[in-house]
Image: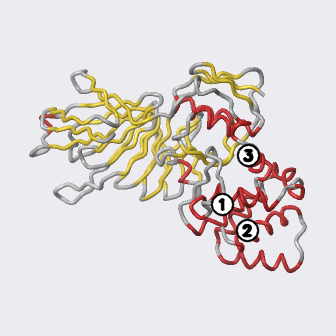
Amino acid sequence: MNEANYNIAALIVKQLKEELSAGEQEALQAWLAESPDHHKLLERLVNEQSLQADMAGMAAIDTDQARQRLVAALFPEATPQVHRAPWLRVLTRNKRWYAAAAILVLVLSGITYRWLQHSPQQAVVASTVNDVGPGGSKAVLTLANGATVTLDSAGNQVIQQGTTVIHQQNGQLQYRVQGAAALVGYSMNTLTTPRGGQYQLVLPDGSKVWLNAASSLRYPTVFSDTGRLVELTGEAYFEIQSLSRSDNKKVPFKVKVNNMVVEVLGTHFNIMAYSDEQAIKTTLLEGSVRVLQNSSGQVLRPGEQAVIAAGHEIKVLRNVDVQEAVAWKNGVFQFNRAGLQVVMRQLSRWYDVEVVYEGHIPDQEFLGKMQRELNLSEVLSILEKSGVRFRVEGRRIIVSQ
């Protein structure tokens, strides 16, 4: 993080505290004029009412030491001489967001500095004896005849099913049709991931699917040229291969979830449809999809999300953080003002643990990123900085205040 970015972060903090001088106001306005993204970020931070109390405490912080710790956490590759706590990782994908990432962490001082000023030894909530490792690549393939095949990241095998050859290799299942794709060999397969598992699948048409934990996908071993239909429970990310018939008409691809259908021609999107969540969310990254429920439908464009809650019509959210929706696929937990129960449901599925609340459920919100490769104790250590307390007993997490 360069000096200019750090100075902009300080200006935004002063803006929130209403302490900007005329010259500083001019400098901030110049930065805002550089990009529409800067405007969006500032608007978002100004609306964070809960952060105002945290800003008042910034004058008491050792800013030099805090800056060193922030740089080490944000950009470890650029500051190898600074120790980085192993349980805190802030990820960035594009250099143009370095300033935004730094500002966000600085403005969230009430949470961030509490994280950075505590040592890992002070934050341990579970002994290594009771610790739970992260999930991994594992699933069960159910064939048309009811036979099951256990899959993992290490296995390599070939399964012949009619005109279809199924290859399992390096945590991925791939279907290949031999000769003409005749429906004579048509059958249905189901790929199911357990709690604590995820898996990748290449469908017979070349479309790619990533299944999150506690999910299943039912699909044919051969697609017809009139339509492609799969059925999903849980959560999956799709990259659909465009397919045309001999008359050059596109073959539609449909994903069915309960009474909802997502229809696509060629696109990248994520569907989250767990039964213990309050709504089904379809998030579009590329292309175009149509979300259908009963007699109503909505067309999504990139950056939009369709939300269907029980008993409600389709609601379309625009300019959503698509990376948050697919963070699980990229090996990351990502939270944007997520409530404690939302966070714990994700942990429950990935670590295959039960969550129990003692007394009142803490009213906390979380914002940030953590890698999914962390052990459960490391994740809970981070979350404890919010004041919530966790106790691990076997594969059960007890939550209290």
Three-letter amino acid code at the position of disc 1:
Ala
Q: At 80% from the left edge and 69% from the top edge, which residue is drawn? A: 11
Q: Along the polypeptide, which appears first: circle 2 or circle 1? A: 2
Residue 101's label in the rendered image is: 1
Q: Residues within 10 Å of mark 2 (few under 14, many from 20)?
A: some
Q: Nearer the viewer, residue 100 or 73?
A: 73
Three-letter amino acid code at the position of disc 2:
Tyr
Q: Which residue is mark 3?
A: 115
Q: At 63% from the left edge and 43% from the top edge, which residue is drawn? A: 87
Q: Secondary structure at mark 2?
A: helix
- Report x, y in % for residue 114: 78, 46
Of tags 1 and 3, the one toward the viewer is 3
Q: Residues within 10 Å of mark 1 (few under 14, many from 20)?
A: some
Q: CA distance from mark 1 to mark 3?
A: 16 Å
Up/down of 31 relative to 90, above or below: below
Q: Along the polypeptide, which appears first: circle 1 or circle 3? A: 1
